[in-house]
Amino acid sequence: MPSTSYVVAVLAIVFTITLALRAVPFAVLRTLRTSAIVQELAVWMPVGILAILAAAALHTTVTEAPGATPYAILAVAVTAATHLLFGRRTILSVGIGTVTYVLLLNAAPLEAGLG
């Protein structure tokens, strides 16, 4: 069993590293708020996330369930339209797009070759 001094030293190191890792974001927060890069990321990141999500969904659909490709394309279109029409709310648009896709698949599973 390790000695008491060894355990205390390890705990002190772990405490210091944890405290530093949690404090650093707050220490640089003021600099990040005025950063042009962070402001650009705030604009483009939601669009990028939606694009990656749409590409992954379409790739999976085309490779694993080709009969459902029209449903996936329609759901992506609904997602994009929702995103643009309802104030660019990412969670709302992804949720409505997902519900659309699930409803389309369950409405006609035999035609899509999934049933």
Image: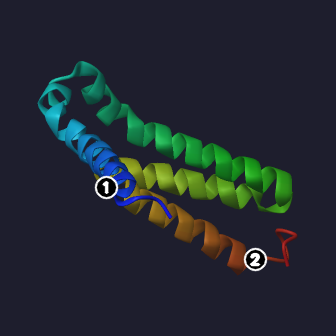
Disc 1 element: helix
Residue sitting at 40 percent across and 42 percent down? Answer: 46
Answer with left or right where residue 53 lies relative to residue 84.
Answer: right
Determine which residue is flagged by label 2. 108
- Separation (CA) of disc 1 from disc 2: 64 Å
User: Which residue occupies the foreground of this view, 43 or 32?
Assistant: 32
Q: How is the image coloured?
A: rainbow
Answer with left or right where residue 90 lies relative to residue 75.
Answer: left
Residue sitting at 31 percent across and 33 percent down? Answer: 43
Name the amino acid, label 2.
Ala
Residue sitting at 30 percent across and 22 percent down? Answer: 37
User: Which residue occupies the foreground of this view, 63 or 67?
Assistant: 63
Answer with left or right where residue 63 lies relative to residue 27.
Answer: right
| Residue 52 location (% of width, % of height) | 57, 42
| Residue 104 location (% of width, % of height) | 66, 71
Where 65 falls versus 46 (above or below)? Answer: below
User: Which residue occupies the foreground of this view, 52 or 97?
Assistant: 52
Determine which residue is flagged by label 1. 8
| Residue 8 location (% of width, % of height) | 31, 55
Name the amino acid, label 1.
Val
The crowd level at tag 2 (other Cα within 10 Å; few <14, some 14-19, many 20+) is some
